[in-house]
Amino acid sequence: MIKQFVYPINFSIPSQKINNQPLCKLKIMSSLIPGKLDTYIYTNETDYYNEYKSSMFALTCKKAGWDCMRHYEILANECIPYFPDILNCPKNTMTLLPKDLIIQGNYLYEKLCSKTIDSLLQEEKDEYASLLKSLLEYTRNNLTTVKMAQYILDKINVSNVSNILYLSGDTGPDYLRCLTLHGFKELYGKKCHDYPKIPHIYKSKDINYSSLYGKGITYTNLLEDELHNNDLNNTIIDDIKSKKYDIIIYGSYHRGMPLFDLVTQTYEPNKIILLCGEDIHHCNYFEFSNKGYITFVRELE
């Protein structure tokens, strides 16, 4: 049983990353194999995405954590994840992923894996197309960054949210923090203020992709720079004290909680939202949930 005020959460993907162009499938299984480093040959997002677009299935699996950006990148590029160990996933982890559909995909791959594209029967192509359509629709309707932000708002049940403060300690790459922030920025624009600014999610010609985790694929260069109001950085203390923001979100309570003492002195616990996007950790979410803070944990048993 999940503790009160604790909810599962997943990674998500920006809607603009979901493919809407006709595809030409060239092979049954993608050549990109998780954990096999000699298959990690892609240095940019376009080539990486095209590998999945040209494949009917792509292998994915639990690595450090069950939830993985690869699951969403496969789905967004109209490819069916082959996830052989998904039946072992804890029930409170990846709760928003379409596990039943992915299990159907496992069975379908195992039926087709000995074939080539050219040897597929029409009924097999139709079965694949039908399942792929269901997965893509589910992805659009449930797994985008905007949907994840809406999911959080629905769970916290705070009415009339107009202004949000999104706080971070470490501003380096963190899939859950970065992509969930993107969803809130898509919904609220400047009225969701990230402090300090997360530079790599804003559009820029100066992003050093080679220095970023995963070469910055999927989670960088997403937002217009004008969506960050630099003036609000200068009034952050006074704005918290005056309760300018309706809710406060900490993008990762493991990676720093700036101004937490001031926030907790000013805001009711149910208006303070804490996110945990870590793979492996001894999570202390109960210490927060017992005080009434709303906590979302990615790898939740």
Image (spheres, rainbow, N blue to C red):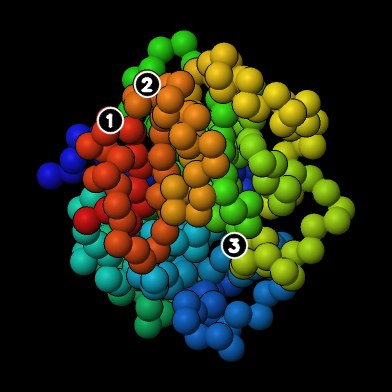
**Mark on residue 268?**
2
Which mark, by number, is residue 284?
A: none
Q: Nearer the viewer, mark 2 or mark 3?
A: 2
Q: Compute the Cα span from label 2 to label 1.
A: 9 Å
Which residue is found at the position 12% from the left and 44% from the top?
1
Question: Disc 1 on helix, strand or loop?
Answer: loop
| Cα distance in 3D space between marks 2 and 3 | 47 Å
Find out whether the residues at labels 2 and 1 contact each other: C-beta distance under 8 Å: yes
Residue at numbered disc 1 = 292
Mark 1 or mark 3: whose residue is earlier in sequence: 3
Disc 3 marks which amino acid? Lys
> In which image quadrant can residue 156 be found?
top left
Residue 259 drawn above or below residue 48: above
Q: Secondary structure at mark 3?
A: helix
- Dividing the picture into quadrants, the one containing residue 274 is top left
Q: CA distance from mark 1 to mark 3?
A: 44 Å
Residue drawn at (39%, 63%) of the image: 279
| Quadrant housing the C terminus | bottom left
Under mark 2, the amino acid is: Glu
At label 1, the amino acid type is: Gly
